[in-house]
Image (tube, rainbow, N blue to C red):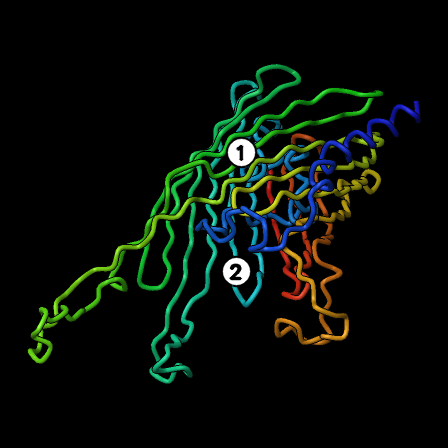
């Protein structure tokens, strides 16, 4: 029995990470054809909830709560009752990402619909130009990137579910704005191995139209070139509008597995693994674990979580260990913690049918860029 469990765990981790481990870390601009920096609306790849953030890029197979609206639409139909989640992320460089999701099972619990909204940005930042490098003019700009999603999910059997989310995306960057449409698709296969649950998931995120920006910031005044031989004749300025490039959305393909190492009426330990292939970066993988335990008959339960995400293109290599100021980073900052995340949650349900609530928290390290933190509050009824 124990050997069978070890075999399942080994298969889980190998399936999720084997392909990524075979990749050599790329050197940008030297033999790599990865499309770095060719997509827009990158906030669509940000983990919006604390549970998912604490479990890194390994959560699509285990997502069967309200956060499945983002991580895997197939998991929404596995919710046992309606729920709502409100999350906020304190992100890098004093930016913030807010997310709200709500879902309703119906059809005897085999189907569900959901609605989600995510917004990332900042406001009133000084405008710096070549002529005004200190921002003394007092001009400011703001960024507000928003998506609105509508999800449908269905269980087609006791082992298989699928779902999709349609998204409208609005991207406001200073004086320009653009819109796009996208679709997420996800599947979930779940069965029992050695008497414990094994889940497998495949998801595709952000398949959609290109994002092209327009706005007053692209309106310019130009001076037409003088005709040949008439350089001394002044030319009247003319109004024109610059044409912005259309950018692809950040598409991501993910394959994930989750297995319960043990599961009783009072506790559960799940291990997870996931392989990720984005269209704008090198492939990577994530591994994580979640331990959930009920506190007797109080109705409360605790769930500590930890994960590690490997993304070869997101690390830097200083010329030498003594060059602490490489790329302008402070001497006290190290890249060694990049990719680690941890967190936990507390949940209260007096009974499976009663009103419940929970609070989750997560911290994720971005190495030299610092840590981000996520707080989520969820309700069910």
Mark 2–mark 1 Cα distance, whole angstroms, equals 25 Å
Name the residue rendered at 82%, 42% in the picture.
295
Which element type, helix, strand or loop, lies under badge 2?
A: strand
Dot 2 corresponds to which residue? 96
Quadrant for the N terminus, please. Answer: top right
**Which of pointers 2 and 1 indicates the residue nearer the eye?**
1
Determine if residue 381 is in view.
no
Mark number, residue 116 = none
Locate residue 192, reporting x and y percent.
77, 20
On screen, residue 20 above or below 177: above
Q: How many marks?
A: 2
State the image quarter where residue 77 is shown: top right
The residue lying furthest to the top in this view is 157
Determine if residue 258 is in view.
yes
Badge 1 local density, few (<14 within 10 Å), some, or many (20+)? many
State the image quarter where residue 232 is shown: bottom left
| 204 horizontally vs 61: left or right | left
Dot 1 corresponds to which residue? 204
Point out the tag, 2 or 1, that comes first from the N-terminus. Answer: 2
Quadrant for the C terminus, please. Answer: top right
Front one among 75 and 17? 17
Locate residue 345, reporting x and y percent.
71, 48
Name the residue rendered at 69%, 57% in the picture.
363
| 324 horizontally vs 72: left or right | right
Name the residue rendered at 65%, 16% in the picture.
158
Locate residue 141, reporting x and y percent.
37, 69
The residue lying furthest to the front in this view is 229
Front one among 185 and 103? 185
Locate residue 170, reporting x and y percent.
37, 49
Which element type, helix, strand or loop, lies under badge 1?
A: strand
């Amino acid at each position: 029995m124990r050997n069978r469990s070890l075999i399942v765990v080994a298969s889980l981790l190998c399936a999720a990470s084997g392909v990524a481990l075979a990749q050599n870390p790329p050197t940008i601009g030297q033999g790599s054809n990865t499309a770095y920096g060719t997509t827009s609306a990158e906030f669509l790849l940000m983990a919006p909830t604390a549970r998912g953030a604490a479990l890194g890029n390994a959560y699509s197979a285990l997502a069967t709560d309200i956060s499945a609206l983002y991580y895997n639409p197939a998991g929404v139909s596995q919710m046992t009752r309606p729920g709502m989640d409100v999350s906020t992320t304190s992100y890098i460089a004093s930016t913030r990402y807010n997310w709200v999701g709500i879902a309703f099972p119906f059809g005897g619990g085999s189907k569900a619909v959901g609605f989600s909204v995510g917004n990332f940005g900042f406001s009133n930042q000084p405008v710096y130009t070549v002529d005004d490098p200190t921002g003394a003019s007092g001009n400011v700009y703001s960024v507000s990137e928003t998506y609105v999603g509508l999800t449908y999910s269905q269980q087609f059997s006791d082992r298989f579910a699928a779902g999709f989310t349609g998204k409208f995306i609005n991207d406001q960057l200073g004086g320009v704005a653009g819109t796009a449409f996208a679709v997420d698709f996800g599947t979930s296969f779940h069965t029992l191995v050695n008497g414990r649950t094994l889940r497998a998931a495949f998801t595709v995120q952000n398949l959609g139209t290109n994002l092209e920006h327009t706005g007053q910031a692209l309106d310019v005044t130009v001076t037409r070139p003088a005709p040949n031989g008439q350089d001394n004749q002044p030319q009247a300025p003319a109004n024109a509008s610059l044409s912005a490039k259309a950018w692809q959305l950040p598409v991501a393909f993910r394959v994930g597995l989750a297995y319960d190492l043990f599961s009783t009426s009072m506790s559960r330990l799940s291990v997870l693994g996931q392989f990720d292939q984005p269209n704008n970066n090198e492939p990577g993988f994530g591994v994580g674990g979640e331990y959930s335990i009920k506190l007797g008959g109080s109705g409360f339960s605790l769930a500590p979580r930890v994960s590690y995400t490997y993304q070869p293109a997101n690390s830097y290599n200083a010329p030498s260990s003594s060059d602490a100021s490489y790329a302008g980073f402070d001497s006290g900052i190290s890249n060694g913690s990049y990719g680690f995340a941890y967190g936990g949650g507390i949940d209260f349900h007096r009974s499976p049918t009663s009103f419940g609530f929970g609070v989750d928290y997560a911290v994720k390290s971005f190495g030299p860029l610092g840590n981000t933190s996520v707080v989520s509050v969820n309700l069910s009824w």
